[in-house]
Image: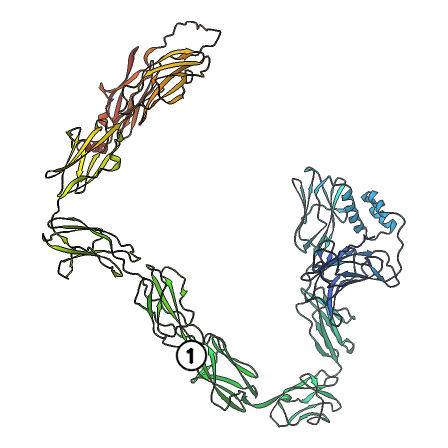
Amino acid sequence: PAPPAESSQNTEGNKELLLLVSLVHKQKGKTGTVNLYSGNITFTAKVAGESLLKKPSVKWFKGKWMDLASKVGQHLQLHDSYDRNNKVYTFELEIIEANMTFAGGYRCEVSTKDKFDSSNFNLTVNVSFPFPSKTNYIFLLLRSTEGHDEAGELNFSALLKKRGDGKTESQPDVDVWEILRKAPPSEYEKIAFQYGITDLRGMLKRLKRIKKEEKKSTAFLKKLDPAYQVDKGQKIKLMVEVANPDADVKWLKNGQEIQVSGRYIFEAVGNKRILTINHCSLADDAAYECVVGEEKSFTELFVKEPPILITHPLEDQMVMVGERVEFEWNRKGKTNKQIKNNGKKQYLIINESTKEDSGHYTVKTNGGVSVAELIVQEKKLEVYQSIADLTVKARDQAVFKCEVSDENVKGIWLKNGKEVVPDERIKISHIGRIHKLTIEDVTPGDEADYSFIPQGFAYNLSAKLQFLEPPKIHLDCLGQSPDTIVVVAGNKLRLDVPISGDPTPTVIWQKVNKLLFESEGRVRVEKHEDHCVFIIEGAEKEDEGVYRVIVKNPVGEDKADITVKVIDVPDPPEAPKISNIGEDYCTVQWQPPKYDGGQPVLGYILERKKKKSYRWMRLNFDLLKELTYEAKRMIEGVVYEMRIYAVNSIGMSRPSPASQPFMPIAPPSEPTHFTVEDVSDSTVALKWRPPERIGAGGLDGYIVEYCKEGSTEWIPALPGLTERTSALIKDLVTGDKLHFRIKAINLAGESGAAIIKEPITVQEILQRPKIWLPRHLRQTLVKKVGETINIVIPFQGKPRPKITWTKDGQSLDAKDVGIRNSNTDTILFIRKAELHHSGAYEITLQIENMTDKVAITIQIIDKPGPPQNIKLTDVWGFNAALEWTPPQDDGNAQILGYTVQKADKKTMEWYTVFDHYRRTNCVVSELIMGNEYFFRVFSENLCGLSETAATTKNPAYIQKTGTTYKPPCYKEHDFSEPPKFTHPLVNRSVIAGYNTTLSCAVRGIPKPKIYWYKNKMDLSGDAKYRMFSKQGVLTLEIRKPTPFDGGFYTCKAVNERGEAEIECKLDVRGNHMSIMHNTNTAVK
């Protein structure tokens, strides 16, 4: 009993794909029935291919995933065909001599590029008896035109349309499913026999799925898969996972328990139980079970046997009666046939052949078929004269003649395997033992292989008729001037030359008396029966010329000349030349290419790029006809390169080499603000500003020139160029009137000249002294102690004035204050300011009887001292009142305020109560009851807070209300004791050159002061020794001691209760080299 068939719809378009599956079997429904070991069954799938572009793909499956294409062999065959008239594809699955393993569910899947469908059906193998009825079922696979599912799916619908008059078997009245579900596994076979169940395995599988839905397995975490497949001779592992890692499992094969052997290996790894089957054979193709307690896990193992291929096919044989025949394979026959097996070779031997043994012999395997024919003749025919090969020319007569021993034997004439039919030109005659074939007016079509076959005998007398024809070259231009073929360089030239002639003529190609016979390479010749081919791969200029083709055969020869012309793009021009370079333009010039490619040059294309770039930019879109071009719109200061292309009708040449790099630049503009700064009796000082536009060429310098009034000759005022923006012109004649001009110079040349309009008289000019006091110095200059003071005061006056600095009317100390003077300013410099540098400084300028003065006030400030006389005036409630007086040292600056802090006596952590407080008394509130507080006050000025603070001597105790605690009076215990060494110094002997230490331990209250001595000499000031004291452990480190450091070392500890000392001896050993080195060092 099979479940109802599944169907699905597809909604894309109105196309329809029809799949016809025809089952021929012995039972109704979708289940086919066949007899065990004797019944054959064929499943046929028909696919309508009207709407298909190519053949669909069909797969046949057994179970869920077993692909039957891998099981093709003796019992299973797959066939397909195509009906071109009806446009229907037919696919067949044929099962031959079915056994019980073929029973079960099958599936046929059909798919194309965008379509898919499948159909399921079952096969039942009947052990006892077959049903006599014959039923034909048709399954229709429709492509629906309704619905809204995804396009491209194909589904079976309208299944099981019955044809024929087959009888149906009545269903049993009892519910077999319910009986099997309640029965124990040991009763399954008994129930199957009682109710005639033939597909017990299939029903048990379905029953297993039903039980899975009812109850989840408690013994297995993971069961076996429904089926496994393995190649013959390979290894496979079957694995389950059990819930209890200590559970024992049993493995069964076809219901029989498997015992451990070399081929069957059991493994238990944690929860996993594994059955390994080595070297699988066809006997391992069975059903397997894994049993844990009352639960089982089932699976099927399919062993795939490789197909047997026929590597040496059977060969046709012809023998006489009584001779021995030997075929390489086997065939069932009579007793006079013998089968021989020799490894992979098998033979069928007929010792004494008879006339009845003639026929076709076929050998079949699951991998192929081979057929051969055996001809057995009764007697032997002798041939006195066989037919001979003939060579004739056009219009000649050809006669084939043979003579056999029996004049009554008839025969047939064949031409290329086909029987010759006589006509007016072809005659066939038989006179006695002679047979003739006569052909009049021979034509090329008569050239063939001719045979005479006597009837009743396995003879084939053959000969060949060869037709002779003069060679001929078939060219359209033959007889005229040489034909010219033009080919573009780089393209492939293929020249097909039709030729004729029989026998096939020999073809010779040559160029300038040079034979061309290569069959491979760039230039090659291919020869065919009716034509020859001349090929040039990637034509080059050297391939130009006249080619001659000559054809020859024994009848004659012919020849023809062909001219090949190769045209190409022009050669690249030479590198262009650049001239007339401006700010953003230049002129490009070039010469035509040396070779124009066989076609006139149509024009040129110009490109440019930046030197450090890889991207070339095209400058013209229309071809340039001239050989010059003015390139514009370039960026000044950028280095460019140019290149040129030549263009003809074939294309564009390769680029020319790049031009020499060049930079578009322009001269700078003239300098600005050109003025006279100073004039003396023999010098003139000039100054100016850089040009407004310098350009990418930069600025190399300036050239200054002068010209005497009334003259036109400009004389360089300075040797060479100057990079400064000022110049002092010396060695001039007093009283001369001079004109001055200046020019800026760069790579592009000189700029325009900047000229002073009025002539300059070389003569000293008297100027009153004047001090230009900076604005920030008109107020008091405030500096902190330690800061640097650098005051620059500009002035004017000619000739150079005398400069005097004073402080508070006194001259300055040159060791304390630095003064530097120039022609235009004076500088006061103090490296580190001190308080005594405060005061009023006066600068005096004097030229003859003219003077100018200015005063500067400098105030040096420092941090103030702490406030004085701080005291706690009152404590009440949660408040405390403080008073203090201003600090004695205000740091040479006004006191800006005070900062008041408090600290709990228990923690002594300070917290700010008031900052920037202006008064000298305050009240600190919000104190905590029961705590004692100390207070301190910092003073503050422009430099910041004072280094130290004034702190109250006594704490302010905030009493608790209602109770006054009187602490008991105890006698203070005296813990003091004199120093005492708890660990002595130890005598030591050390090696010279290595640091060493002397250690001891001491205790004493209060902490004693430690002194170290060597030979009664104090070591405190010697840098060679380092003293350490940590937790009462005293250490003396001697750095790289020498023998001179040996002696008695004493450690002395002193406190107010007494003193103690301890002594040890240190011996320093050293080798001779160390002593010599130390001695030399000491001498040095």
Horizontal arrangement in the rendering, residue 656 relative to residue 363 (left or right): left
Quarter where residue 967 is shown:
top left
Q: Circle 1 — which element? A: loop
* Residue under the image location 29 percent in, 58 percent down: 697
User: Percent position (x, y) of residue 211?
Assistant: 78, 44
User: Percent position (x, y) of residue 579?
Assistant: 30, 68
| Amino acid found under the numbered disc labelled 1 | Gln
Colouring used for the render: rainbow
User: Percent position (x, y) of residue 830?
Assistant: 22, 33
User: Does residue 839 appear in the picture of this structure?
Assistant: yes
**407 and 948: which is toward the camera:** 948
**Vertical arrangement, residue 394 with respect to residue 302, above or below:** below
Residue on which the image places disc 1: 599
**154 and 641: which is toward the camera:** 641
User: Does residue 43 appear in the picture of this structure?
Assistant: no
User: Percent position (x, y) of residue 59?
Assistant: 71, 60
Pointer 1 local density, CA inside 10 Å: few below 14, some 14–19, many at least 20 = some
Quarter where residue 1054 is shown:
top left
The quarter of the image holding the C terminus is top left
**Vertical arrangement, residue 601 with respect to residue 909, above or below:** below
Horizontal arrangement in the rendering, residue 566 relative to residue 529 (left or right): left
